[in-house]
Image: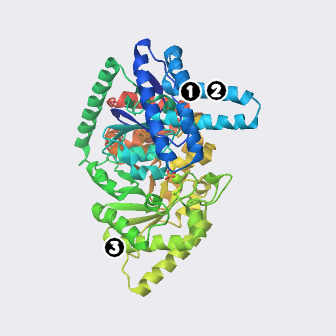
Amino acid sequence: MLEFAGISASPGIAIGRVFLFLEDKLAIPRYAIAPSQVDAEQGRFAAALARAAAELRALAAAGNPVVEAHLLMFEDPELASAVRRGVAERNHNAEWVVAEVVEELSARLGAAGTTYLQERTLDFHDVGQRLIGQLLEHRRASLADAPEGSVIVTRTLMPSDTLTLDRHRVVGIAADAGSRTSHTAILARSLGIPAVLGLSDISRHARAGEEICIDGNRGVVVVGPDADTRARYTQRKAAWEEATARLAGLNDLPAETLDGKLVSLEANIEVPDEVDAVLAHGADGVGLFRSEFLFLQPGRFPSEDEQERAYTAVLRAMGERPVTIRTLDLGGDKIAPGFALAAEANPILGWRAIRYCLARPEVFRVQLRALLRASVHGTLRLMFPLISGPTELERIREILAGVKADLTREGVPFRADVPVGIMVEVPSAALTSDLLASRVDFFSIGTNDLIQYTLAVDRGNERVAYLYDPFHPAVLRLVRMTILNAHARGIPVGMCGEMAGDPLATVVLLGLGLDSFSMGPLGIPPIKRIVRSVGAMEAESLVRTLLALPSGGEIAAAVRRWTGTRLEPSAD
Ligand code: PEP
Ligand code: MG
C-alpha cells in the first residue's frame, strides 16, 4: 500500500481501479516483491515476453529488418534469463528489473568500443521499452477506453484529453502535475469527479488495474489499499454522499444572508450538457460558460451554426436565468489540438484570449454572430476575457457594432440590448476598474488569472503552488478596488475564478460586497449554506479587520477562527 499527498483539486471520495494514461515514454514503476510473489511475477514476465514476441513477429512478417533484429534479441536467452534471475534475486517488479538488465547489457556493449556494438545498445533500449510496455499493458491510451470505475492516473491532462472522458465511467483523477486552478482541476470539479493533483510521481508507482482510493477533500491518494484503509474510505465515501444529499435540500432556497442581503450563486460550465448539473444544484444562472471547450476538436474551429446550436441549448435550458458566455480564451495554458497558436517564450503573458480574437477578427466575428443569433432564446450576457485596459474595449465595441449592423442588414433577429461585461483578471484591469466600469454593464473577477498575474505565480505549476494565495493582501486589495469602483458607477460585480467556490473565502467576499459568485455546479450548495449562516454586516466588519493584516496566512487563519465559531463543520 502506498499513500500520496497532493493538492485537493475536486471534492469527493472515490474507490476504483487505476487506468494509466501516460504519454508514449513510459514511466517505469518500482516496487518491492515479497518472496511469495516471485512466481506470480515470473508468470507476468513470461506472458509479457510472449505477447511482445508475437507483436514483433507480426511486424517482422512485413519484412522490417530492424524488427527482425529485435526479434532475435527476444529469442536470445541472455536477456530473458537475466530478467528471470533478476526477478528471483532482486526483490523488485519485472518492469524495473527489465530496465536494470537493459542498462547493464547496454553498458557492457557500449564498453566494447565499436560503433556497431554501441549502436546495438539503442536496440536493447527499444526492446526493453517494448517489454516494459507489455508488462504495463501499455498502449497509446485513449480516455474513451477507461472502463467503468476507473481512476485516471496520469502525469497531466490536456483540455483536449477530456473530450473523450466519460464521467459515468471515470470515478476519480490522480495526476503528478497540476494545481487547484489548472484546467484539469477546473474540469474535474465541473464534471463532479474527485481529483487530487500535484502528486509528483504517482504515475510511476501505480499499476494498471490496481485498486486505488482518492480523497479529493483532503488531497490524499492510496494505491493498493489494505482492508482497513479500504473500509475507512468506503465509510468516508458514504458520509460524503450523505452530506451532499442533505445540502441538496437548500436548492430551492435563496442565497440570502441572515440580515437579508441576496447574492446570486451561479455556475461555471465548459460544455453545454453540464447544464443539467447546473439546474440540479439550484444555480441562479450560468456565471461563466468557457466557450473554448467548443474549440477543442482537432483540425478546425466550430462553424457559426455549430456554435449557435451550443449557445442556444444552454440559453433555452436556463430560460429566464442569465447565461454569461465568455468569448474564446485560447492560448496560454489553453491549447487547442492542431492549432499551434504561436511558439512563444511566455505564452501566459502572450497571445491569448481577447488578444488572439482581436488579431483574428474573422474568428471573433463568427463567434459574435453565433452568440447574437442565440441571444433570442434566453438571457444572454456577453463577456470578454483578459481585458487589460479601456483600449481593447473600444476595439471590441467596434467589431461588435459591425456584427450587429450585418445581422440587421441580413434581417437576422437578435437582442440588441445584450449586456456586455468583462473579466477582471489582469491587475491593470483592476487598477483601471474606475475607467472600465463606466464602459461596461458588469464585471466578473477571474481570480485564477488575477492571482497568477498579481503574485507572478504560474497557476499550473505545482512547484510554486505554495505561493499561490487567494488571501494575499495584494489580491484582496485588487478585489476590493474593483468592487468599490464598479458599485460607485452602478454596475454589479461577480466572481468566476475558483476563489468564488472556496468556502473559506465566502464570508470575505460577502464582506467585500461581491454581488454574485460563480463556481462548478457542485460547489453551489455548500456555499449557499455559508451565505445563509452569516450576516452581511458582520462579514463587512470582519473584512475591515482582515484588510489590516500583513499576510494571506494570517488572514486565512483569522477567517478560520471567525467561521469556526459560527458555522457547523461540513462533513468531509
Ligand atoms: C479566471 O482566470 O479566474 C477564470 C475564471 O478564467 P480561466 O480559469 O478560464 O482562465
Ligand atoms: Mg482566466
Q: Which residue is mark 2?
A: 105
Q: Please indicate whether residue 188 sits to the left or right of residue 27 in the image.
A: left
Give the structural element (helix, strand or loop) at label 1: helix
Question: Along the horizontal axis of the image, is 13 left or right of 424?
Answer: left
Image quadrant assignment for residue 286: bottom left
Q: Where is mark 1, residue-wise?
A: 79
Colour style of the rendered protein structure: rainbow
User: Compared to 312, does 496 lie above or below?
Assistant: above
Q: CA distance from mark 2 to mark 1?
A: 8 Å
- Front residue of 196 and 457: 196
| Residue sitting at x 58%, y 72% | 395
Q: Which sits earlier in the primary sequence, circle 2 or circle 3?
A: 2
Can you tell which quarter of the image residue 288 is in?
bottom left
Q: At 36% from the left edge and 52% from the top edge, which residue is drawn?
A: 266
| Crowd around label 1: few <14 · some 14–19 · many ≥20 (10 Å) | some
Q: Earlier in the sequence, mark 1 or mark 3?
A: 1
Which one is nearer the viewer's eye here, 527 or 330?
330
**Figure disc tally:** 3
Camera-side residue of 6 and 37 = 37
Between tags 1 and 3, which lies in front?
1
Report how far apart the C-alphas of labels 1 and 3 lie in the structure.
Answer: 70 Å
| Residue labelled with disc 3 | 376
The reply to whether residue 509 is in sight is yes
Q: Mark 2, mark 3: which one is toward the viewer?
A: 2
| Residue at disc 2, secondary structure | helix
Residue 561 in sight in this render: no
Query: As drawn, which residue projects farthest toward the top?
Result: 35
